[in-house]
Image: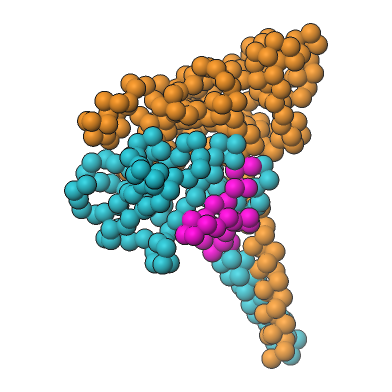
Chain colours: A orange, B cyan
Amino acid sequence: MIRWLLLLCGGALLGGVVHLATIMVLPRTATQDAYARLAADSAGQHGHSLPLPKPESATMPFMDPAFATAVCRYDLSKGSIKLTVPVSLAYTSISFYTRYDVAYYAINDRAAGRRIVELDLMTVEQRNQMPEDEDVTAADRLIVEIADRHRRDCDPGAGARAGPDADGPECDRRRALRPPQALAHRGTLISAERPGSVRATRSAPARCDSAQCRIAAD
Amino acid sequence: MPADRTCGCCIGTLFALAVAAAVGLGATYFALTRGAAFGALTIGSWTAWPKTGTSDADPYARATIARTGQLPLALGDGVSFTAQSDDTGKLLDGRCDIVLSGVTPAARFWTLTLYNGDGELVTNSIQRYGFSSQEIVRYADGSFEIVVAPARQSG
């Protein structure tokens, strides 16, 4: 009897290990995560708009129908990324995700303060290779640096989400008040696994034009 | 006798492994289907996991994200609150009329969307899946009221 109780306890302890192991491994083995869905949906690495979610079809669960979304997958091992997102009237944001769909950075249009958000995304090495004199001067561009120790899986994506759709379900009276274009945009970048730290600095235009990723929502 | 002992030992090991598999996989299944993650922020019926939208997301949050296939809202973008029950704690039921009313959240821009349990939008005849802060009409004191109902109503 005691032997079976011991076996039960041992099994339960081992179960705890199994539980933790499966939780840790699951993000790496999931075949239907957001990255896989977006990779299946998009042809290239250039920004492209996602269709608005509908009850019968949506690219991902819990998509917000109030936002138009554009996504760009990117790979920083081939060079830094330039991102251009037009700002909408109501709200625009750009979010950066790792390959395993962890959001590590986001900004919205208020940080941009202009009609168009221009962003450079690069690793620390790429940043260090930039000429010194282009540093922190013209306040022209926002540079996002990634201290990235795990660039083996570096095949990230990016995107922009934009706001209320002009074709959305509206009553006529209210629709007349609405500007023809989307009211809010949201950008989403999906990137290398686990960037150690990210910081944003304002700087002059960078000359790293490879792997350019332009996002033009709507 | 040696054969008997080997057999008993074998059954014991299998038993322990079976318990381990059941406990481990069962716990993982429950954790992921219940949306367990650390750092939940609860306000009334509404729950949010702000840390899920950062690189500090815990392993449970990461596993949940991977399993459902959603992209979490980045914290610099916003925080998403979810409610599965009304103020009295009853689960939201599509056959009921549900009144959402109160003062506007202190946010620059917010949206309200109705999803089913799988995160899909809910079919309806007027294709209205949610509201944004720019669409609602407020009362004089700044409060608003939204009625979610299975049938069309006036007002």
Residue B25 screen position, x and y as percent:
58, 64
Give me the residue at 75% from left, 15% from top. A136
Left or right: residue A4 compared with residue B103 = right
Residue A146 screen position, x and y as percent:
72, 29
Observer-nearest residue: B67 or B81?
A: B81
Relative to A19, say whether A160 is above or below.
above
Relative to B34, say whether A200 is above or below.
above
Relative to B126, say whether A133 is above or below.
above
How many labels were placed on the picture? 0
Observer-nearest residue: B150 or A145?
A: B150
Farthest residue toward the front? B140
| Residue A193 in sight here | yes
Image quarter in which the C terminus of chain A is found: top left
Observer-nearest residue: B108 or A150?
A: B108
Give me the residue at 54% from left, 23% from top. A45
| Residue A120 in sight here | no
Give me the residue at 56% from left, 29% from top. A108
Question: Which stretch did the figure color magenta?
Answer: B28-54
Image quarter in which the N terminus of chain A is found: bottom right
Q: Quadrant of residue A191?
A: top right
Residue A126 screen position, x and y as percent:
75, 19
Give me the residue at 68% from left, 45% from top. B56
Relative to A23, say whether A201 is above or below.
above
Q: Is residue A203 rendered magenta in the image?
A: no
Q: Is residue B45 rendered magenta in the image?
A: yes
Observer-nearest residue: A115 or B28?
A: A115
Residue A99 screen position, x and y as percent:
61, 36
